[in-house]
Image: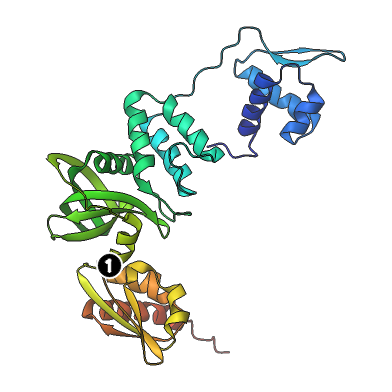
Amino acid sequence: MATESSPTARALRALEVLQFSPGVQAGELAERLGVTERAARRYVEILREAGIPVESSRGPYGGYRLGRGTRLPPVVFTEAEALGLVMAALDGGTFPAGAEDVTGAALGKVIRALPDALGRKAAELRENASTAPAPRSRPHPAVAGELAAAVADRSVVDITYSNRPGREWDDRVDPWAVVVRHGYWYLLCFSHGREAIRTYRVDRVRSVRRSADTFTPPADLDPVAVLEENLGIGWDFETRVRFDAPAGDVSEWIHPAMGKLTASGTGCVLNGSTGNPEMYVQEWLACVPYQFHIEGGPELCEAARTFARRIAKAVNHRKAPRRV
């Protein structure tokens, strides 16, 4: 991918200037590209080397222009590229159809320019993903696209999910919504296997297979609110952690998927569940800058002991001083 300051990106920007400002002179082109005149001429040469006819003429009315009859090739996206582009735009916020925001308008143009089948899938992804900014992990576009399409069609799907290396299982779910929240893409769904609401991270969904069955989502579903209520519920291992600090201080360090935080005396208690005790300890608890005590469950306690031994070994692993 070309960055904003790469030669390829500036050459493409030069092509855009030539397309919409025929007769532009080297000085003006350089100014619009933010480079020297010598560099601007080099970008024109890059275009010529790529087979794009750029004509030039001297004098006060001269300048650069595209050759008469030049037809630029259309931009063609693969399915993964098109869906990835929609996902990248959604990462920065929600852009519903008809949005006045320029990014939303541009996104709509891209979607309308896609072939029918691909454009429909991209539009469904846009329509059915409730978003919040700055995701830390983006799933494969094809997986997100299939799930968004299933949400739109109300199709029951079979998924393969993995929440840690070597731990993988299948589940049949009613996909209620795809939600971008707290830096991750989530599938909010009803699990047939567990007969309960589940929140699966889309980047951990390994495959999606549609069934012939359909479902009816809950009436007046608020995907973001329901996701928040269920992020830390229903996983394999129960968790309970007590903090020696007020809930107001601790809360800003608690990811909603860790569970529910409640005040208790001068401190607070976090009750929840997890499918990955090691991740819970190493990525979440270890980042909380307050003293805490793990009161349950046994899997979380063992994960904390293992992590503590590894850290202690790293600190104590020193060479004995050389004797002289």
The quadrant in which residue 42 appears is top right
Q: Decide which of 170, 101 is in the foreground and name it.
A: 101
Coordinates of residue 215 in the picture (x, y in percent): 16, 45
- The residue closer to the viewer here, 126 or 9, is 126
Q: Secondary structure at mark 1?
A: loop
In the rendered view, would you say 308 is above or below 227? Answer: below
Q: Quadrant of residue 299?
A: bottom left
Q: Is residue 243 visible?
A: no
In the rendered image, the vertical position of residue 35 relative to residue 315, given as above or below: above
In the figure, 133 relative to 144: above or below? Answer: below
Residue tagged 1: 276
Answer left or right for 60 relative to 153. Answer: right
Work out which residue is located at the far top of the displayed protein and give it: 69
Q: Position of residue 285 (x, y in %)?
A: 38, 76
Name the colour scheme: rainbow
Give the percent coordinates (x, y) of residue 140: 35, 44
Going by the picture, which residue comes out furthest to the right?
60
| Residue at image point 48% right, 29% down | 109
Residue lying furthest front: 220
226 to the left or right of 67: left
